[in-house]
Every structure is written in structure tokens, then in C-alpha cells.
Image (spheres, rainbow, N blue to C red):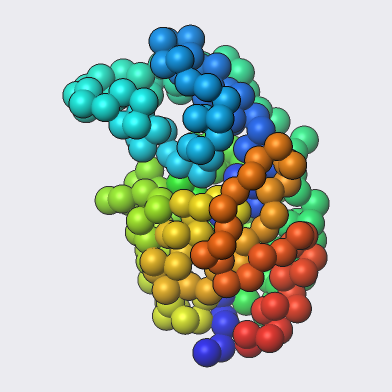
Amino acid sequence: MTVKGVIFDVDGILVNSEPYYFEQRLTFLNAIGAKLTVEESRRQIGSNMNAVLKQVYPGRTMNDYAMIKEGYRSYKRKHPIRFDKILNQDAQTLLAEIAPKYQIGLASAGERQIINQMLDETKLTPYFETIVSGAETAHNKPAPDVYTTAIVQLGLKSDEAVAIEDSEFGIKAGKAAGLTVIALKPLDSQFKINQEEADYRVESLTEVPAILAQLS
């Protein structure tokens, strides 16, 4: 195996957004009657809103879910995040270092609009040859769709790419797609995430180039 490409997750990797989204989603859902505990909400880290709503409100119609999601979008617009303020500087350094050597992709469970906003505000757009939103694939993480799509768009085989993830769902998605997965320790110590299925676990993204060198 010779690694030719690196595919990044967004939240918890490029930006330290997990604490913000955690509080945002928990506050919104409880405001509309979900009665979620902090611990229950923590177990949903790395999941997308579609999956969360099916857990919190099982058996609802697609129209019900769509209305709740639109309400959440409205809530987020009223409580915007400044991605440039929470940029993981190690990610920026890593991207600059590996860009001359590897093809680089992005595979996020998030919505395209938010991904684009993050890239614009952090000025990371030029590093990525392909960007895949799980909201636009048939199945979101933990299904492998975002990664299999990114691999195809990069013109690579699954054993030629590495995924950099943090969440359990993201790790499962990368492994299901046949990628080698490097898991980054949560940027915020309040989050405890099961990363046992990852091939490598790192404390910092500064450790990634050495792993890539071993695999190349």
C-alpha cells in the first residue's frame, strides 16, 4: 500500500467546533421539548441531525423531521459561529506541509453551506481537491458513502487514502470505506469518544506526517 491521499473530517479536526455544536443542539432540542440529558447528547457526538432526530423523535414523518431541521437552521443563523476563531492551528500547519505530497479531500457529515462557510472563514479552501457533504450522499456517517465518494473523486483506491477523524461514527465510516483511519484525541477534554476501531490514535495532528511517511 502506498498512501497518495488524505481525507479530513471537519468538526474536531480542522476546527474545534464540537463544544459549540454540542451546546447549540442540546439547547435547541430541549427548547422544543426533547428533554435530553447532557450525557445522552454526548453519545450523539459525530452524528448528523437526521440520525439524532430519529433517535430523539422515533416514528415521526419525514415532514416532521424537515420542519424541525428548518427550525434548527433558523436557530443556527441567529447564533452564528466564527470558524476563524476556533481554527485548529495544527490542522492548518499539517495541510500546508502535506499539500505538495498528497491529494487532499474533505468528507464531513455536515451540510454544504456550513462546510463552505468554515472553509471561507478559515481560508482553507485552496487545500482541498474535493469536498463531500454527508447531507448530499445516500447515507451519512457511520455509512461509508462520504469516503467512498471522496475516494472516487480523487481518483484513488481505498488502500491509497487515509482518513483523519475523531468521532466514533466517523471512524466507522472511514473503516467501512476501506481506509486507514487516524483518530485525533478530542480537542476538548469534556468529550470522551470511543476511538478503538481506528488504526492509529494521536494526541496532536503534528504526529500525522510521521505516520504518513510510514505508509507511503
Q: Is residue 47 above or below residue 69?
A: below
Q: Is residue 39 above or below residue 7?
A: above
Q: List x then y, in percent, for residue 89.
A: 80, 51
- Nearest the camera: 199 or 154? 199
Q: Is residue 203 above or below residue 15?
A: below
- Nearest the camera: 68 or 96? 68
The part of the image, by quadrant, that contains residue 68 is top left
Q: Is residue 125 above or below residue 76?
A: below
Residue drawn at x 70%, y 78% as measured from the top left: 211
Q: List x then y, in percent, for residue 184.
A: 67, 58
Residue drawn at x 70%, y 31% as measured from the top left: 82
- Give left or right: position of 181 versus 50: right
- Give left or right: position of 76 versus 212: left
Residue drawn at x 40%, y 53% as measured from the top left: 142
Q: Is residue 133 visible?
A: no
The part of the image, by quadrant, that contains residue 208 is bottom right
- Nearest the camera: 163 or 31? 31
How many marks do you count on the picture? 0
The part of the image, by quadrant, that contains residue 176 is bottom left
Q: List x then y, in percent, for residue 95.
A: 71, 63
Residue drawn at x 51%, y 52% as measured from the top left: 168
Q: List x then y, in percent, for residue 132.
A: 44, 54
Question: Where the C terminus falls, by quadrant?
Answer: bottom right
Q: Is residue 167 visible?
A: yes
